[in-house]
Image: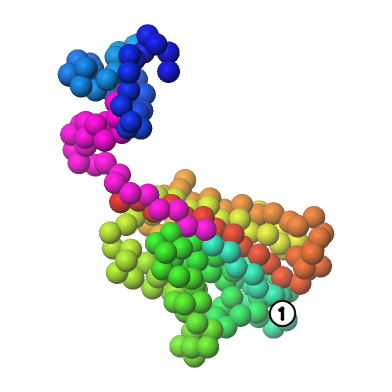
Amino acid sequence: VDGDRADSFDSDVCLYRRDVPDRIHHQDMARRSACRRNRGVFFSYHELSDEYRHLKGNAMISDIRIGQGCDVHRFTEGRPLILCGGKLPYERGLLGHSDADVAVHALIDALIGALALGDIGHFFPDTDPRYQGADSMELLRETLAHPAFSAWRISNIDLTLITQKPKLAPHIPAMKESLSSALSLPEERVSIKAKTNEGMGFIGRLEGMEARAAAVLIR
C-alpha cells in the first residue's frame, strides 16, 4: 500500500472502499490505523462489516457457501428427454431410476454440496422404489425443504449441459423459466449454457449427456 494512504496497518484483512460516508472516515482514524485518500479509507474487515451492518439496516451477508455438482446419464430408446422439468423433442431419452433429468440432478448435487450434506445418491438412492420414475423437479423441491436450507437463500446458479445432440440453445429460455420458478429466483440469476464435446468421448459418440452445476447460497 502506498505510504500516503496509510502509515501502518494491523493484522486484520483490510478493504478499500470509496463509497463509505465521510462521517465514517473521520471516526478515530488512529485506532483504525488508516488514512483518507480520494474519499476512501482502509478499514479492518470486521470494522467495515460493523459499519455496513449499521448503514444497511442489518442486511449484511454473514456467510456464503458454494457447491458444485455433476451428473451423467446414458441415452436410451423409448424414454422422453427431460431437462429442467420439460420434455424436449428428440428420438431418445436418458436412462435412469427417476425421470433422468440430468440437469436437475446436477443442480441438486450442487445445492447439497454447498451445505456439505452429502450427494444426491444419499438423499435419493436409486435402490429406493419411491423414486422409481420420480419427477426430478419434485426432488428439487424436496431438497430445498430440508431443514438445513431454512437458514439460507440461493443467490444464483450456473448450469452447463454437455451433449452432441440435440441442440439445446433453442430450449434454454424455457429451461431458465422453469428453474427460476422452482427456485424462486429471478431469471437473471439462473444461468444455463449448452456445449458440445467436439465429437469426442461418449458424448461425441451420442451415448449420453453430462451436466455440471454451481450454486451459491448466502445468509
- Give the image location of residue 117, x and y in percent: 41, 68
Residue 25 drawn in magenta = no
Residue 64 drawn in magenta = yes
Give neighbour class at mark 1: few <14, some 14-19, many 20+ (Cα, 10 Å): some
Q: Residue furthest top?
A: 4
| Residue at 21%, 17% in the rendered image | 30
* Vertical order, 18 against 80 (above or below): above
Does 147 sit left or right of 208 as displayed? left
- Give the image location of residue 22, x and y in percent: 22, 16
* Vertical order, 162 against 10 (above or below): below
Looking at the rendered structure, the kind of residue marked 1 is Thr
Residue nearest the viewer, comparing 81 with 140: 140
Residue 52 visible here = no
SS state under label 1: strand
* Vertical order, 39 against 109 (above or below): above
Query: Which quadrant of the view contains residue 54?
Result: top left
Query: Which quadrant of the view contains residue 164?
Result: bottom right
Does 153 sit left or right of 124 as displayed? left
- Give the image location of residue 95, x and y in percent: 65, 79
| Residue at 27%, 20% in the rendered image | 33
| Residue at 46%, 88% in the rendered image | 130
Q: Which residues are magenta?
A: 42-68
- Give the image location of residue 70, x and y in percent: 58, 64
- The residue singled out by tag 1 in the image is 76
Residue 212 visible here = yes
| Residue at 47%, 45% in the rendered image | 188
Does 202 sit left or right of 46 as displayed? right
Query: Which quadrant of the view contains residue 25?
Result: top left
